[in-house]
Image (tube, helix red, strand yellow):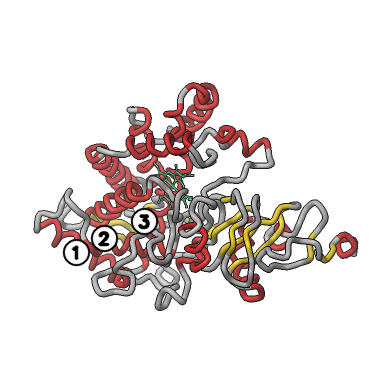
Amino acid sequence: ASIAVLCYVNNDADERLPPGPRVRLPLIGNLFLHAPTMAFLPSALRRLRRSHGPVVTLWAGNRPAVFVIGRDFAHRTLVRAGAALAHRPPSPFASSRALSFNRHGVNAAEYGDRWRRLRSNICSCLAATEALRRRSVDRLVATLELEARAGAGATGVVAPTDAFRHGVFSFFAVLCFGEWVRDGEHDAVLRDLRRAHADILALTVELGAFHLVPAVLMTTSTALEWTMARLVHHSDIQRKLRHDIAKTTNSGGVGVSPSPYLKAVVQESLRLHPPAHYLLAHTVDRDVPLGAGGYVFPKGAIVNYAVAEIGRDATAWTDPDEFLPERFMEGGEGAMVDAASCGGADIRMMPFGAGRRACPGASFAVSVLHLFVGRLVEQFEWWPMAEDDKAPVDFSEKTGLVTVMKTPLRALIVPTTSS
Ligand code: HEM
């Protein structure tokens, strides 16, 4: 009853804002009423989309927080009104300001010269890492082999989440700091990095890439885990992939370009299981008209994008909830779509965002995934656990800044005859 007294129907909000539930609490708004934690957000947005349409306004305190759920509006705003949307909202909380290094990090930096320099630093440090990538994947294979042989009975069973994280982490750690991290040490190293970063942050713009390691590690290793989970579940796709890789390798494809089916598998995994279900928050430096219903994003509004909903949109994909890499093969409905550079004529998926603030590591991340997935499939057959035959892999999601598997993957691995 007290909540009912406190709630009020908001009639004085900017009428040009996209529609949304009008009931909200003074000071608190209504975002937290609909999604008290991030875990509630996907179902809340689906519900709100049905009642209010593809762009919905909620309130975070007394600031409008707009959620773009429709791909057409994502394109209209991120791509066509790109410059206006290229801003990040300052965080109201001291803790998150500290986490973003007071906007000195590239992901939170104000759109402008500093941001441009930080981005170009990142892109230049990602070049020429071929040998490093191969060494990282060799180490990952060795770790999995050890795990499969460990314990009584050498069952071949692995729970590879940590090995995936460590494999990806070692790679980025060497890239940034030139040193290999020993197994089991990466949490401690991350803590040291955060401490060191806080101390020397102000001294150099190059360190703008530094704090990204945890985010990059989680997104890339999570994408690897979802992809391998799909391959464990769909043994026919796994077999076809192994065959396609062998065919490409035999015709001189190794080290030159990934097999077409490998590209399709990774792309389909990023469509159906984007590690980031939401882009980082954007804001606008001017009123941005949406061109429909007379709505605008008013200057200063927080704008969020529902990445997973956009990738699973039934107006863009046949059977959007099915894992069908063939859709990205020649002649398929997604043959012209590239996960790493979205936003041409329209948006059909955007695991890395679109427009000016889109992920600068996208192509790099995709090429790392090609290498890791390709090698893991060449090296091992991946089987569901014998006792889990009836419900082989649990695809439930644990939504957060990065959406991970609620039940981490477990699988039986068997070295392939060619390995
Ligand atoms: C599968 C792996 C990855 C995924 C799914 C991913 C996804 C994303 C997403 C969704 C954004 C937010 C875009 C927006 O707010 O509009 C982002 C931003 C960013 N990502 Fe990634 N990313 C991945 C890997 C990487 C890698 C490997 C790097 C660099 C080494 C990287 C560096 C960045 C940076 C610097 C930003 C902030 C860009 C800006 O604000 O201008 N990411 N990423």
Secondary element at tag 1: helix
Q: Earlier in the sequence, mark 3 or mark 1?
A: 1
Q: Earlier in the sequence, mark 2 or mark 1?
A: 1
Image point 15% across, 55% down: which residue?
A: 418
Q: Residues within 10 Å of mark 3 (few under 14, many from 20)?
A: many
Residue farthest along the left direction in this orientation? 251
Q: Which mark is residue 191?
A: none
Q: Nearer the viewer, mark 2 or mark 3?
A: 3
Marks 2/3: CA–CA distance: 18 Å
Secondary element at tag 2: helix
Judge left or right: residue 343 versus residue 81: left
Q: Nearer the viewer, mark 3 or mark 1?
A: 3
The residue tagged 2 is: 262
Image point 60% across, 48% down: which residue?
A: 285
The residue tagged 3 is: 341
Amino acid at circle 2: Leu
Q: Is residue 153 visible?
A: no
Judge left or right: residue 94 versus residue 262: right
For label 3, being within 8 Å of ligand 1 is answered no
Measured as percent of width and height from the top left, residue 140 is found at 31, 44
Amino acid at circle 3: Ser
Q: In this view of the protein, which residue sits in the foreground, 375 or 274?
A: 274
For label 1, being within 8 Å of ligand 1 is answered no
The residue tagged 1 is: 244
Image point 34% across, 46% down: which residue?
A: 147
